[in-house]
């Protein structure tokens, strides 16, 4: 019996769950009244206490991809071959679900389920968060960009260029590189956030989100890891 207990205790540090992450994850189950200034949103697993919500049907995603993560054992793999995808849209924006060839993506949402998205808003304002950082690698075809958006109530946020508060848009390299985007408590509505962060693969012929495309691209694949909310501005000084 002593041997069994000793082995059980010895094995505990090797678990995939990291109790120390609770220090930087102020979810309702872990709240202490003190914010650490950092919230790990993904590291081997989603750590938001919320769900992930796809924007389309037609891309492939794997949140437990084990080949060459940036740290730990797993990362996110998200891939699109450029084919038209079924985009989910509610009335009256579109008469029905429809096919399009401009983008695919997903969001790490605050709600525990996609059905509860609208009612699952979280107050993130007390954390003093000023940026979202993430690591990415991959390969994108011509005129396809990785686009990252913070929570926003701006109906035209999808038209905003790279560098707008809460928006990052660019390409990635085959090796892991850290990127970041600055956020603002008011601009990004952190008092009633429905999304932590959105990741999008976007086809854009001229790199200007406000202009229309005439063709379509061939998609690409990105890998994402170590996604965090931070109280530090980006880039670090």
Image (cartoon, rainbow, N blue to C red):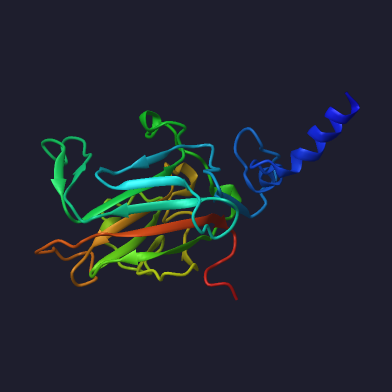
Q: Is residue 139 above or below residue 12?
A: below
> Which corner quadrant holds the C terminus?
bottom right
Q: Residue at x 60, y 34 (%)?
A: 28
Quarter of the image where one finds residue 99: top left
How many numbered dots are placed on residues in this image?
A: 0
Which residue is the extreme one toward the bottom?
237
Quarter of the image where one finds residue 222: bottom left
The spot of residue 82 in percent (x, y) is: 21, 56
Q: Is residue 195 or residue 16 the one in the foreground?
A: 16
The spot of residue 1 in percent (x, y) is: 88, 23
- Left or right, 129 with respect to 52, comes to right
Q: Is residue 142 or residue 4 the one in the foreground?
A: 4
Q: Is residue 213 or residue 123 the one in the foreground?
A: 213
Quarter of the image where one finds residue 219: bottom left
Which residue is the extreme one toward the right?
2
Q: Residue at x 41, y 60 (%)?
A: 166
Q: Residue at x 34, y 59 (%)?
A: 221
The spot of residue 120 in percent (x, y) is: 44, 33
- Left or right, 122 with respect to 198, comes to right
The spot of residue 86 in percent (x, y) is: 19, 42
- Left or right, 192 with respect to 92, comes to right
Which residue is the extreme one toward the top?
1
């Amino acid at each position: 019996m002593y041997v069994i207990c000793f082995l059980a205790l010895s094995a505990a540090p090797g678990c995939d769950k990291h109790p120390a992450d609770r220090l930087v994850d102020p979810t309702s189950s872990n709240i202490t009244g003190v914010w650490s200034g950092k919230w790990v949103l993904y590291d081997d697993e989603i750590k938001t206490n919320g769900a992930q919500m796809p924007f389309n049907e037609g891309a492939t995603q794997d949140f437990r991809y084990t080949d060459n993560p940036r740290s730990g054992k797993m990362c996110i793999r998200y891939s699109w071959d450029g084919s038209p995808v079924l985009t989910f849209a509610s009335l009256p924006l579109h008469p029905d679900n429809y096919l399009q060839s401009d983008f695919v993506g997903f969001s790490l949402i605050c709600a525990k389920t996609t059905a509860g998205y609208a009612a699952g808003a979280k107050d993130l304002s007390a954390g003093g968060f000023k940026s979202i950082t993430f690591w990415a690698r991959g390969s994108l075809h011509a005129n396809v960009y990785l686009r990252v958006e913070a929570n926003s109530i701006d109906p035209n946020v999808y038209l905003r260029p790279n560098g707008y508060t809460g928006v990052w848009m660019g390409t990635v390299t085959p090796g892991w590189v850290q990127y970041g985007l600055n956020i603002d408590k008011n601009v990004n509505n952190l008092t009633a956030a429905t999304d932590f962060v959105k990741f999008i693969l976007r086809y854009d012929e001229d790199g200007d989100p406000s202009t229309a495309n005439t063709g379509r691209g061939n998609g690409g694949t990105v890998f994402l890891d170590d996604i965090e909310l931070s109280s530090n501005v980006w880039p670090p000084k």
